[in-house]
Image (cartoon, rainbow, N blue to C red):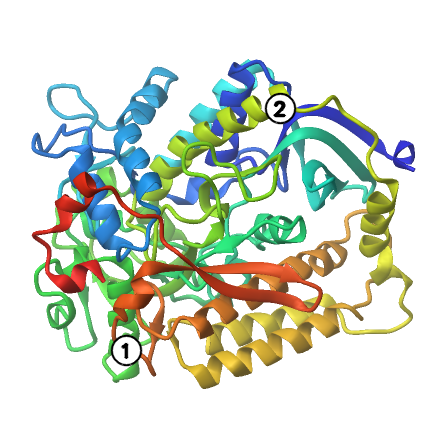
Amino acid sequence: MTDRYETHDLDVLVIGAGGAGLRAAIEASALGASVGVVSKSLLGKAHTVMAEGGVAAALAHVDPSDSWKVHFKDTMLGGKMLNNWRMAQLHAQEAPDRVRELEQWGAVFDRTPDGRILQRNFGGHSSPRLAHVGDRTGLEMIRTLQDHGVHRGLDIYMECTVTQLLTDGGRVVGAFAYWRETGRFVVFRAKAVVLATGGIGKAYKITSNSWEYTGDGHALALGAGAELIDMEFVQFHPTGMVWPPGVQGILVTEAVRGEGGLLLNAKGERFMERYDPKRMELSTRDMVARAIYTEVKEGRGSPHGGAFLDISHKPAETVKKKLPSMYHQFKEFANIDITKQPMEVGPTTHYAMGGVRVDADTGAATVAGLFAAGEASGGMHGANRLGGNSLSDLLVFGRRAGAGAAAYAANAPAHGNLDSAQVEAAAEALLAPFQRASGPDPYSVHRKLQETMHTLVGIFRTERDLKKGIEEIRALRDEVGKARVEGSRAFNPGWHLAHDLRSMLIVSEAVARCALQRKESRGAHARLDHPGLDPELGKVNSVATRDEDGVRVSQSPLPQMPAELRALFEAEPAGART
């Protein structure tokens, strides 16, 4: 029975304590809901901190001609028109107010000479649009949101992992979790749940993502019967560290290129001229990542299999002032002074454009009582996210999901008894690896999964590779079902990984199946066997749902954009629209 476990009753449970989760929790609390925030790691260790370059908002402080319509258009074109138009519209319209709100809450942004928030250039944006704090913007945002949230009196449950959403009559009514330190189980009764768990990067071998990014929210949503969309679109950030091996994949912010950094191959050529002569280094991330990959493959790469990113032509003091984190990161990890030497960089798995299908205005998923925001949700970024849009996305839709969840909770029935069979099944599934006398260890399975995703479901894809990848993922799912863990439940990272692998494998299957289904190249999804755009596939989202055998995929039509917004694109060449 549920009374065997520690239990908490809440109006709104937010799973994830990054920018989206904190903004959702703040909004739900402001609307009178009792709110709890579950954090898989420690408060402050969110991936929002990794978003260093800036937050995209059409404040028009540097370019007076900038507007929400231009930002909307850039976002849609960057996403190859696969974005949910309503999400892109709300994002562009509301981002400036959300940034100003952060400033009112205490965020300290870099300034123009006349004292307004300074903005910088970034790839895919047609104006200097990114409000920033040096190259530590995400850190400042998290600090501000945490301070504001703590003062609101939010209940924070740190180092706690949610393993299953609990349902009743087709609606989400709570969650089952465990404390990572002790292994003890905890049950949350909630009238509404917000997923803000971030991305899926740890399924890949080379990633900018930390250990928490195991697709938890995506898997929880599928398990509860919700839909995921556009899972084939995985963003490979063009610039991660490639050397030394211990720091491979750590992000090198796009702000380096925004401040004038040049990409060079081993011959000293500024190679982006071959791939996007108009935008060069400030092309979209999918384009730059594939360009670096191609240069390396054709023998023009740097000594450790990347490209050179050079900012040393700028004055040393400017570099240290504008890019302090990058200066210290390369000094400490690679013994390189970026004011004097180029950095070695290469593509790293960075961001999932796909996620839980949500209503644009409320963040509601396709299952009652469930909401999602930030990287865990899909639709906003289409086939490729523009740099800086993730930070404004989590502010705009974190707020909306929090408001949506609070409104739903206000009209939801009082807390009832949870289904004890669901709770006991969740507990048994978690304890199963301890019961087995033999079986593979989770670490070996994880290494195999990362290698499979890296080589078969990576930057460039083919039908043959994807089919092989799906076979290997399903074989690994069987291995995880037999995985054995030793020791106690306290401080047991192997046990934690055994559970995380269940999430990573189901999400990896969704990525591979959606990629196999989309027979074209669009945005971050590049098929060598289907290199062109298919206009018909520009009209559909990929949809992933859970069935007894794994993941089932289908397609659904894109929401129709209103005529007044469609008119913004009529001057664009046909290729930009398809």
Q: Position of residue 269 (x, y in %)?
A: 12, 72
The 10 Å Cα crowd at callout 1, few under 14, some 14 to 19, many 20 or more, is some
- Sequence-earlier tag: 1 or 2: 2
Q: Residue at x 28, y 37 (%)?
A: 89
What's under tag 1, amino acid-wise? Pro
Residue 219 horizontal side relative to residue 560, left or right: right
The 10 Å Cα crowd at callout 2, few under 14, some 14 to 19, many 20 or more, is many
Q: Quadrant of residue 193?
A: top right
Residue 514 horizontal side relative to residue 98, left or right: right
Q: Residue at x 40, y 48 (%)?
A: 379
What's under tag 2, amino acid-wise? Ala
Q: Nearer the viewer, residue 246 or 154?
A: 154
Counting the numbered discs, the total is 2
Q: Is residue 120 visible?
A: no
Q: Is residue 552 visible?
A: yes
Q: Where residue 409 is drawn, which disc sits there?
A: 2
Q: Residue at x 13, y 65 (%)?
A: 276
Estimate the spatial distance between the alpha carbons at disc 1 and disc 2, rounded to whole Å.
47 Å
Q: Quadrant of residue 365?
A: top right
Relative to 145, say whether 388 is above or below.
below
Q: Position of residue 206 (x, y in %)?
A: 47, 66
Which quarter of the figure is the N terminus placed in? top right
Residue 371 horizontal side relative to residue 476, left or right: left
Q: Nearer the viewer, mark 1 or mark 2?
A: 2
Which quarter of the figure is the C terminus placed in? bottom left
Q: Where residue 531 is drawn, which disc sits there?
A: 1
Q: Position of residue 224 (x, y in %)?
A: 66, 48
Relative to 201, say whether 517 is above or below.
below
Secondary structure of the residue carrying numbered label 2: helix
Secondary structure of the residue carrying numbered label 1: loop
Q: Quadrant of residue 281?
A: bottom left
Q: Residue at x 50, y 51 (%)?
A: 199
